[in-house]
Image (cartoon, rainbow, N blue to C red):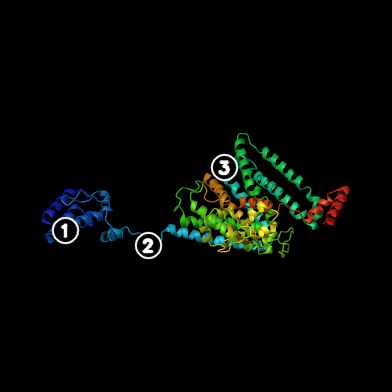
């Protein structure tokens, strides 16, 4: 090896300094040639070199030290001998490295790395898959309510399959060898839950609300009994298949099955009601969650950890505060305009109770929340701001003043408090008018901002807040499950996205929130003429007579 004759190299360097010759380049120090070759090379350089000044020799040494510092070679002093070359660095340099500067050697390659290409390919795959799913979603929406319900039912089956498969794969050997009918009982529980949820929907919304289907009421009354029979049968079979020595494990599996049913069936129990209350109550929440997911992603990759470095959620380390906040802001803005756009179509706003397989034009008396109305922004908000700031806001804000009565030199409000009979309420109200610039008989009362909006936009803000603040925690739950079982995705059904659970983890709780919001703030009762006729038929003779008498009295009394 090249490190056996280090003393010869040291003596050559000492002789060279005495003659005043420059030190060889740094590439010579790291060569793999033998010591005799280096000695011959040094001698030839000594014979051909002239006398060089000391300052030139020192500057050359500094350049040599800086060149070899990145190669982990010992630095040289002006009057010291060259240290022995270590075997770990006695490797030939590439031609480019020996002839270029350190800046050129450390320069990053211009070609894209495989990681960047893989990330770009994955983003393109996700984009194409997302566009295909969005196109299919719009097509099914235009096909009719029945097909939308069928899509929801299919998604519930896929969601249940992916979630119960998590623990099935984790404990496959133990399940197959010791627990009989394990998968059978799981799917039986799912079928019981689906039958109970949808039978109630069919009876209440489709049959009772449709006079043409009232002949099925005799069969519909058996639905609760059939649901209970299926439940008891599944319950008995589950207990009968428990094995001694594995009861604790089977109870854990049963608890997991019940949790999955709560997620996939319990949260989606009323999604069919949302569909038949008007497709807007099904479409708008889904689009809000999608908007929040997309905008949170782009906000995270563009601004993530630039303003807030604190971790957002340990269950999902890639999530950032900037993505969470940015996604919420964009969701509220888009929800405001998207709800106004969807409110234009009766296909979205009209409820229905028809079970048709071919789409028909929907005609109904559109509810007031889908008509334009003038509402006033709470003036108390503007009182919290300085007047100068309020005047600078780019809004159509009107300053309302209380105008004084010149004859009494008191404000109308003061006059009303002193002599309330002197001013009629209408006269008092008429004195509150927009302020007139320069008028001495006025006093500021409040700021007024009139908004011409569609009330559904206010409901959209409420749903957007839930989609931004609460719904993402459904995704965090899914991340926790995958982290617990060392999974990347629940399935590979959707290219670039994973499984159905990976895309709909936030949609389930959003659907439940929409039903609660609708029945609390939009339509507290769902009474219809068909339901009233159904209830009338359930009355006895005396009750029917009393009912008709009271109805007649209400009609005559106006």
| Residue 281 percent across, percent down from the top left | 66, 57
| Residue 435 percent across, percent down from the top left | 58, 62
Q: Is 25 rendered above or below residue 246?
A: below
Task: Please tell me whether mark 2 or mark 1 is closer to you in this view.
Answer: 1
Callout 2: SS: loop
Q: Is 184 rendered above or below residue 557?
A: above
Task: Identify the mark nearer the N-term, 3 or 2.
Answer: 2
Q: Is 85 rendered above or below residue 376?
A: above
In the image, taking residue 211 as reference, residue 449 lies left or right, namely: left
Residue where numbered disc 3 is placed: 173
Residue where numbered disc 1 is placed: 56
Task: Identify the mark nearer the N-term, 2 or 1.
Answer: 1
Task: Name the residue furthest bottom.
Answer: 361
Contact flag, marks 3 and 2 (Cβ < 8 Å): no
> Residue at point 65% right, 43% down?
181
Structural distance between the alpha carbons of marks 1 and 3: 78 Å
Query: Is residue 508 visible in the rendered structure shown here?
Result: yes
Graded by Cα atoms within 10 Å as few (under 14), some (14 to 19) or many (20 or more), the crowding at tag 3 reads few
**Residue 376 falls in which quadrant of the image?**
bottom right
């Amino acid at each position: 090896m090249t490190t056996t004759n280090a003393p010869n190299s040291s003596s050559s360097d000492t002789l060279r300094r005495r003659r005043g010759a420059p030190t060889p380049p740094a590439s010579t120090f790291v060569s793999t040639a033998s010591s005799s070759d280096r000695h011959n090379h040094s001698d030839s350089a000594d014979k051909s070199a002239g006398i060089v000044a000391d300052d030139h020799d020192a500057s050359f040494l500094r350049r040599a030290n800086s060149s070899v510092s990145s190669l982990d070679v010992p630095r040289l002093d002006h009057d010291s001998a060259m240290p022995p070359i270590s075997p770990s660095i006695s490797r030939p340099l590439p031609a480019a490295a020996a002839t270029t500067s350190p800046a050129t050697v450390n320069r990053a390659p211009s070609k894209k790395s495989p990681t960047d290409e893989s990330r770009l390919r994955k983003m393109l795959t996700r984009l194409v898959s997302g566009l295909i799913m969005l196109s299919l979603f719009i097509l099914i929406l235009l096909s009719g309510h029945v097909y939308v319900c069928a899509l929801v039912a299919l998604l519930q089956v896929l969601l249940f399959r992916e979630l119960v498969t998590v623990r099935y794969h984790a404990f496959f050997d133990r399940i197959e060898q010791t627990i009989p009918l394990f998968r059978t009982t799981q799917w039986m529980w799912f079928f019981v839950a689906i039958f109970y949820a949808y039978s109630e929907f069919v009876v209440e919304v489709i049959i009772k609300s449709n006079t043409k289907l009232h002949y099925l009421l005799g069969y519909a009354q058996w639905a609760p009994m059939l649901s209970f029979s299926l439940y008891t049968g599944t319950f008995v079979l589950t207990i009968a298949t428990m094995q001694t020595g594995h009861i604790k494990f089977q109870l854990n599996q049963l608890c997991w099955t019940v949790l999955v049913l709560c997620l996939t069936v319990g949260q989606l129990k009323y999604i069919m009601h949302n569909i038949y209350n008007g497709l807007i109550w099904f479409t708008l929440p889904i689009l809000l969650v999608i908007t929040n997911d997309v905008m949170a992603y782009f906000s995270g990759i563009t601004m993530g950890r630039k303003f807030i470095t604190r971790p957002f959620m340990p269950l999902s380390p890639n999530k950032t505060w900037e993505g969470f906040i940015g996604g919420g802001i964009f969701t509220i803005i888009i929800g405001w305009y998207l709800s106004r756009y969807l409110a234009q179509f009766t296909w979205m706003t009209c409820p229905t109770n028809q079970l048709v397989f071919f789409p028909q034009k929907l005609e109904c008396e559109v509810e007031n929340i889908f008509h334009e109305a003038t509402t006033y922004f709470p003036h108390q908000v503007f009182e919290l701001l300085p007047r100068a700031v309020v005047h600078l806001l780019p809004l159509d804000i009107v300053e309302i003043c209380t105008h004084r009565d010149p004859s009494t030199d008191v404000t109308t409000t003061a006059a009303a408090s002193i002599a309330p009979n002197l001013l009629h309420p209408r006269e008092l109200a008429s004195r509150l008018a927009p302020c007139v610039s320069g008028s001495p008989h006025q006093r500021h009362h409040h700021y007024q901002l009139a908004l011409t909006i569609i009330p559904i936009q206010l409901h959209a803000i409420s749903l957007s807040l839930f989609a931004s603040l609460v719904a993402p925690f459904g995704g965090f739950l899914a991340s926790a499950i995958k982290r617990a079982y060392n999974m990347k995705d629940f399935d590979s059904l959707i290219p670039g996205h994973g499984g159905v659970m990976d895309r709909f983890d936030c949609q389930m709780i959003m659907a439940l929130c929409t039903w609660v919001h609708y029945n609390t703030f939009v339509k507290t009762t769902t009474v219809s003429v068909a339901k009233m006729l159904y209830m009338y038929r359930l009355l006895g003779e005396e009750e029917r007579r009393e009912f008709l008498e009271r109805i007649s009295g209400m009609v005559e009394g106006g």
